[in-house]
Amino acid sequence: MYINFWYPVALTEELKDEPIRARILGQNFVVFRDSNDQAHTLSDTCPHRGGALSAGVIRDDCIQCPYHGWRFDSEGYCRRIPSLGKDAKIPKRARVDAYPTQEQNGI
């Protein structure tokens, strides 16, 4: 990725209730909407086992990995790891890259 550039990722009409996968310059991304209808873009690779987040589901404004249920918020921070229990402390390194996302003119 080239920093300080904007890349069209998807049409507004394509982004509904399910995450979508985008591939730009050889990198995979997942794009999803939260409950406020805001679009968000993250790296598409779960740091746990390399699963495609775009194959997961949206739960509580987070994208959930389809393999072990790790959930990542719109800023890329892991908010839930089911195997650690409900009140577990989540390691800071359990995160994915997040990218500024803006919708304009249907893109």
Image (cartoon, helix red, strand yellow):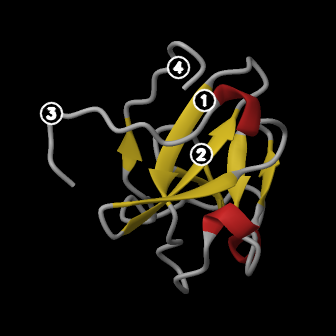
Q: Which mark is residue 39?
A: 1
Circles 1, 2 touching at the beta carbon (< 8 Å): yes
Q: Earlier in the sequence, mark 1 or mark 2?
A: 2
Tell me, yes or no, if residue 51 can be seen here: yes
x%, y% of residue 91? 44, 64
The residues tagged by marks 3 and 1 sit, at their Cα atoms, a distance apart of 19 Å
Secondary structure beneath dot 1 equals strand
In this view, the residue in front, 5 or 17, is: 5
Crowdedness near tag 2: few (<14), some (14–19) or many (≥20) residues, C-alpha within 10 Å: many
Side of 102 where 67 appears, left or right: right
Q: Which mark is residue 103?
A: 4
Q: Earlier in the sequence, mark 3 or mark 1?
A: 3
Query: What residue is shown with label 3?
Result: 4
The residues tagged by marks 4 and 1 sit, at their Cα atoms, a distance apart of 8 Å
Q: Which mark is residue 31?
A: 2
Q: For the image shown, how many numbered marks are present on the structure?
A: 4
Secondary structure beneath dot 3 equals loop
Amino acid of disc 4: Glu
Amino acid of disc 1: Ala
Q: Earlier in the sequence, mark 3 or mark 4?
A: 3
The residues tagged by marks 1 and 2 sit, at their Cα atoms, a distance apart of 7 Å
Q: Residue visible at 33% across and 70% down?
A: 26
Circles 4, 1 touching at the beta carbon (< 8 Å): yes
Q: Residue visible at 43% across and 37% down?
A: 8
